[in-house]
Image: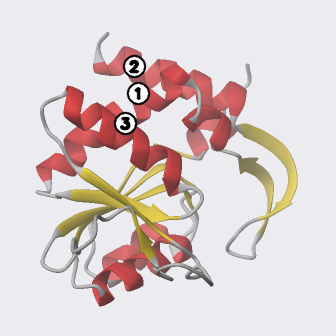
């Protein structure tokens, strides 16, 4: 399948399974008349594979050794990218940033690293399902930078085009998305 065909197939999956209209309060606190619930697309077999494949080349191009992001949105993407990376012969490891450390066990904020493994000195890509202002990814970035990681890319499936690009530019970070929200808002089918 060509890249254009895969992108078109993923757009259809997202439109059918994850895009909706109706008033909703976003994680940023803003109110919108449309929304994306990306979990049905991220957990769709074809959607998962296409998202991971489309993200992988961009991630690898930055030299990232690890991929991950803030729970819950980054969890399915991280697993898919890691699996596809091995199949493509470009393995990257994954991690998840907790919003709050567990109150028991090792009480870690960053999960998925082996005992003795650290993000210190590692190049990482931060993954997101939907980006509005960049606030959710910023939480993950802060935790990862505090752990000594170098963020090479922030990548999202859908950018709502409501300030994230400018926010990340202000932090000196590269930001990309697979789609812009307008691509779905303007569809009539």
Left or right, residue 72 beside residue 171: right
Q: How many marks?
A: 3
Marks 3/2: CA distance? 11 Å
Query: Of circles 1 and 2, which is in front?
Result: 1
The residue pinned by badge 1 equals: 50
Q: Are marks 3 and 1 in contact (CB under 8 Å)?
A: yes
Q: Secondary structure at mark 3?
A: helix
The image quadrant that residue 44 belongs to is: top right
Q: Is residue 93 left or right of residue 100?
A: left
The residue that label 2 is drawn on is 6
Residue for point 73% across, 19% down: 189
Query: Residue at 21% across / 34% down in the picture?
Result: 86
CA–CA distance in space, label 3 to label 1: 5 Å
- Closer to the N terminus: mark 1 or mark 2? 2
Q: Residues within 10 Å of mark 2 (few under 14, many from 20)?
A: some
* Cα separation between marks 1 and 2: 7 Å
Residue 147 visible, this angle: yes
Helix, strand or loop at label 1? It is helix
Q: Residue furthest front?
A: 105
Q: Are marks 1 and 2 in contact (CB under 8 Å)?
A: yes
| Residue 123 x, y percent position in the rendering | 16, 67
């Amino acid at each position: 399948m060509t890249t254009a065909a895969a992108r078109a197939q993923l757009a259809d999956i997202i439109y059918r399974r994850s895009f909706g209209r109706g008033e909703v309060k976003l994680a940023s606190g803003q109110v919108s008349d449309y929304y994306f619930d990306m979990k049905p697309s991220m957990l769709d077999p074809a959607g998962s594979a296409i998202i991971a494949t489309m993200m992988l080349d961009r991630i690898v191009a930055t030299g990232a050794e690890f991929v991950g992001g803030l729970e819950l949105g980054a969890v399915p993407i991280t697993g898919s990218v890691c699996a596809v990376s091995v199949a493509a012969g470009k393995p990257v490891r994954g991690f998840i940033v907790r919003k709050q450390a567990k109150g028991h066990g090792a009480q870690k904020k960053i999960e998925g690293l082996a005992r003795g493994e650290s993000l210190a000195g590692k190049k990482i890509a931060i993954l997101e399902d939907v980006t509005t202002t960049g606030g959710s990814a910023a939480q993950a970035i802060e935790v990862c930078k505090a752990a000594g990681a170098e963020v090479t890319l922030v990548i999202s499936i859908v950018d709502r085009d409501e300030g994230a690009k400018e926010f990340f530019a202000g932090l000196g970070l590269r930001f990309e998305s697979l789609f812009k929200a307008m691509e779905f808002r303007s569809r009539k089918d």
